[in-house]
Image (spheres, rainbow, N blue to C red):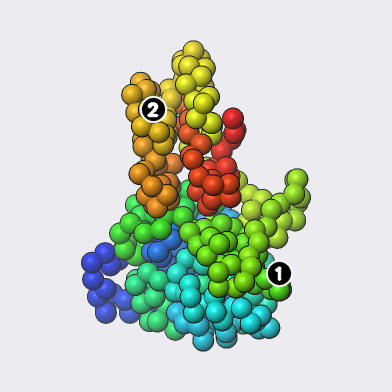
């Protein structure tokens, strides 16, 4: 397939926007930027179009997709039986990096929800994403635009590496701002429950909804509440070893003895002096670490390193960045 490229980094050209909308209306897939990561979108009400997302990504079909809409009214169209606190959450956090899991009104194609009675919906804040949603007048199902299992794309080049030739179009909107995926919030109970942590935290949500809990998978449960949580995620090309600061030098020595080419992703400046094949600094603060995380993970390739040693960053338990690193890790030491 010939993947058409569109440039919307600085300005959004009306005729190009129409062309992108047409591709989506005709049932093709289009990758576009959101404020979190790039998404691979298709008409959420068209089963055949949605199937193309799963094919392009190599995604297991029991993993439901997030539906993107432009307004609160559009979100209400797709859902039903909303608890009272949802309205306040939407007014406060949307458009923005949060997905609401709500009772499904039956408007989207069956594969979008993977047979669940709920649907995940979010209103993205990225101007390009909003412009595309407004131009198509369609709800767009859009998972992250990476091959299944790989780190999510935070720039158009990442999407091109994973999906070029497999999708209808790619819209370049520059680097994404947040860098990690939206907070996924189950809003079917008396209080909201975080299924996937993101930039909007349990404390932020509790301030608006009165309370907020975080779902934790116990043991090797084969039916987690958010189906996506059971799969390999965010994996770089080489094994990622997540290591406590105190044991980092020892681990580096261990792999050096085995003549392995070491990649190092570090937080503490103390490790900047280590002599390894390739090293990258995580970032100055939480915001920058999130923004750069997937770019870092994608930068360590098999051609250059055999193993990636990553310093366990000093963040509170349950932080979204730790969640992603722990899922990406082959080993945690
Ligand atoms: O920031 C984001 O959320 C990005 C951008 C593109 O919007 N999208 C994204 O989609 O991360 P994806 O498909 O990579 O992750 C969606 C997550 C999966 O873990 C999935 O299992 C969960 O949301 N999910 C979707 N619908 C759900 C539902 N009805 N119930 C429970 N979990 C759901
Ligand atoms: Mg994903």
- Can you say whether 106 is above or below 51 in the image? below
Using the image as rendered, state which of residue 162 and residue 150 is in the foreground.
Answer: 150
Q: Residues within 10 Å of mark 1 (few under 14, many from 20)?
A: some
In the drawing, does residue 101 fall left or right of residue 5? right
- Can you say whether 43 is above or below 254 in the image? below
Using the image as rendered, state which of residue 166 and residue 241 is in the foreground.
Answer: 241
Q: Residue at 49% x, 40% y: name it.
A: 314
**Which residue corresponds to mark 2?**
271
In the image, the residue with mark 1 has its CB under 8 Å from the nearest atom of ligand 1? no
Q: Secondary structure at mark 1?
A: loop
Q: Secondary structure at mark 2?
A: helix
Q: Residue at 49% x, 13% y: name it.
A: 257
Residue 232, percent across and down? 60, 46
In the drawing, does residue 145 fall left or right of residue 3? right
- Residue 115: which disc? 1
Determine the CA span between mark 1 and mark 2: 48 Å
Q: Residue at 54% x, 34% y: name it.
A: 242
Residue 70, percent across and down? 45, 79
Looking at the rendered structure, the number of numbered marks drawn on it comes to 2
- Residue 234: which disc? none
């Amino acid at each position: 397939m010939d993947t058409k490229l569109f440039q919307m980094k600085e300005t959004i050209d009306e005729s190009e926007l129409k062309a992108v909308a047409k591709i989506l209306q005709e049932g093709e897939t289009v990758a576009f930027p959101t404020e979190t990561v790039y998404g691979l979108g298709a008409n959420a009400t068209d089963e055949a179009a949605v199937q193309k997302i799963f094919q392009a990504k190599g995604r297991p079909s029991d993993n439901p997709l997030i539906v993107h809409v432009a307004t609160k009214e559009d979100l209400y169209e797709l859902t039903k039986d909303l608890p009272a606190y949802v309205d306040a959450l939407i007014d406060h956090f949307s458009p923005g990096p949060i997905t609401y899991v709500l009772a499904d009104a039956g408007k989207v194609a069956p594969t979008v929800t993977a047979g669940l009675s709920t649907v995940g919906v979010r209103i993205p804040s990225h101007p390009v994403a909003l412009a595309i949603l407004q131009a198509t007048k369609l709800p767009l199902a859009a998972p992250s635009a990476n091959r299944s299992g790989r780190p999510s794309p935070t720039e158009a080049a990442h999407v091109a590496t994973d999906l070029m030739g497999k999708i209808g179009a790619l819209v370049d909107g520059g680097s994404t701002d947040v860098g990690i995926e939206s907070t996924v919030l189950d809003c079917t109970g008396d209080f909201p429950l975080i299924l996937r942590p993101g930039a909007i935290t349990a404390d932020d949500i509790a301030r608006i909804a009165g309370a907020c809990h975080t779902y934790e998978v116990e043991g090797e449960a084969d039916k987690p509440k958010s189906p996506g949580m059971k799969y390999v995620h965010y994996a770089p090309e080489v094994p990622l070893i997540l290591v406590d600061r105190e044991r980092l030098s020892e681990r580096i020595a261990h792999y050096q003895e085995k003549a392995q080419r070491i990649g190092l992703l570090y937080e503490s400046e103390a490790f900047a002096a280590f002599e390894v094949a390739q090293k990258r600094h995580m970032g100055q603060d939480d915001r920058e670490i999130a923004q750069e995380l997937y770019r870092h993970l994608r930068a360590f390739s098999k051609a250059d390193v055999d193993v990636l040693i990553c310093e366990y960053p000093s963040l509170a338990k349950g932080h979204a960045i730790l969640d992603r690193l722990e899922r990406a890790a082959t080993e945690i030491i």
